[in-house]
Amino acid sequence: MRKVLILLLTALFILSATGFDKVKQKLYDELRLIMTKQEEKEFKSIKDEKGLQQFVEKFWEKRNPDPSTPQNEAREVYYKRLKAAEKYFREPGKKGWLTDRGRIFVLLGPPSKRDQRMMSYEDAANIAASRWSAQARFSLGSTGNLNGEIWYYDDLKLVLVFLDEGGTGQYRLINPPPVLLDYLDKSKKDFGIKSNQEGPLPISADVDLKGKKLYVHIPLSALSFKKKDGKFYADIKLEFYYTNAKTGVQKSFAQEMKFEVKEKDIKDPEKRVTIPLNIAPLKGVYILDIVVQDVIGQNEGKKRYKLKI
């Protein structure tokens, strides 16, 4: 997978007329639908080709449902949907997967049924507002002068209506049901990272002033894991900021750590990983900020301590 991604990005740079900026924008357009906020922030800070290669490799590695196989099913499904959305739902000045129809197609998949017909705005609004029922499926009697589409998702009991209000080929979703946002958010996460823990990581720390150590603890039950060759792995990024309370001078330390865990320990609330930090070089009063990120699950925890060392 790594070789494929590197070859793909290299080809993009060779073919690109304007180089790095064009390739970066293309990748952002393709991946933005399922990027997390943190990933968007990281992506915008990338300055070179190597950074893009590393980002894309990591992006799909985290979304690989079975790392033990050479295929990444999530990536394959995503790009198949992008290709179909570009073919069928492209609109003037907008890529297919960034239109209302295309975005929903990529995240929810193809509808169970798709009706294309002429209808009035009132018809569209009424159908969109109707609850799922046999009557809603067949309440398409009246016609109007606008191109419209009705999408049915049987498994979600969802009816979506799109209308070309200006006759320009640009379809807008009419009266979207509130539950649609929940479905789209869930689908976005289905392409992304499965997390065992909602909300911030419940990290804690112990300080050993005599031994000049700070011990950071993270419960295993709060982390997400990848399975490879029958083994489970966690991936943690730790950032440690220490600020001299008197001078205000801040320094930092960051490290990403991968480690193997036993399957029986994953759900055990008593099991945890402990990371020792050396504070021996520090003398005086310091503000210590600890940030721990679950790289697989994208959850994060923060702690602040004020210590006289």
Image: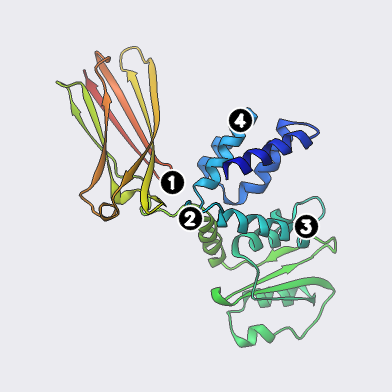
Which class describes the residues within 10 Å of circle 3: few (<14), some (14-19), or many (20+)? many
Task: Relative to 246, say whether 302 is above or below.
Answer: below
Q: Which of marks 3 and 1 is nearer the N terminus?
A: 3
Gap in angstroms between the C-alphas marked 3 and 1: 33 Å
Q: Earlier in the sequence, mark 3 or mark 4?
A: 4
Q: Residue 50 carries which label?
A: 4
Which class describes the residues within 10 Å of circle 2: few (<14), some (14-19), or many (20+)? some
Q: Nearer the viewer, mark 4 or mark 1?
A: 4
Which class describes the residues within 10 Å of circle 1: few (<14), some (14-19), or many (20+)? many
- Mark 4 lies on a secondary structure that is helix
Q: Are marks 2 and 4 in contact (CB under 8 Å)?
A: no
Type of residue at label 4? Lys
Residue 206 horizontal side relative to residue 112, left or right: left
Q: Nearer the viewer, mark 3 or mark 2?
A: 2
Q: Residue 66 carries which label?
A: 2
Q: Are marks 4 and 1 in contact (CB under 8 Å)?
A: no
Q: Which of marks 3 and 4 is in front?
A: 4
Q: How is the image coloured?
A: rainbow
Type of residue at label 1? Ile
Q: Which mark is residue 90?
A: 3
Gap in angstroms between the C-alphas marked 1 and 2: 13 Å
Gap in angstroms between the C-alphas marked 4 and 1: 21 Å
Q: Pointer 1: what residue? A: 296
Q: Which of marks 4 and 1 is nearer the N terminus?
A: 4
* Viewport quadrant of the N terminus: top right
Residue 15 position by quadrant: top right
- Which residue shows up at 47% across the image and 52% down it? 68
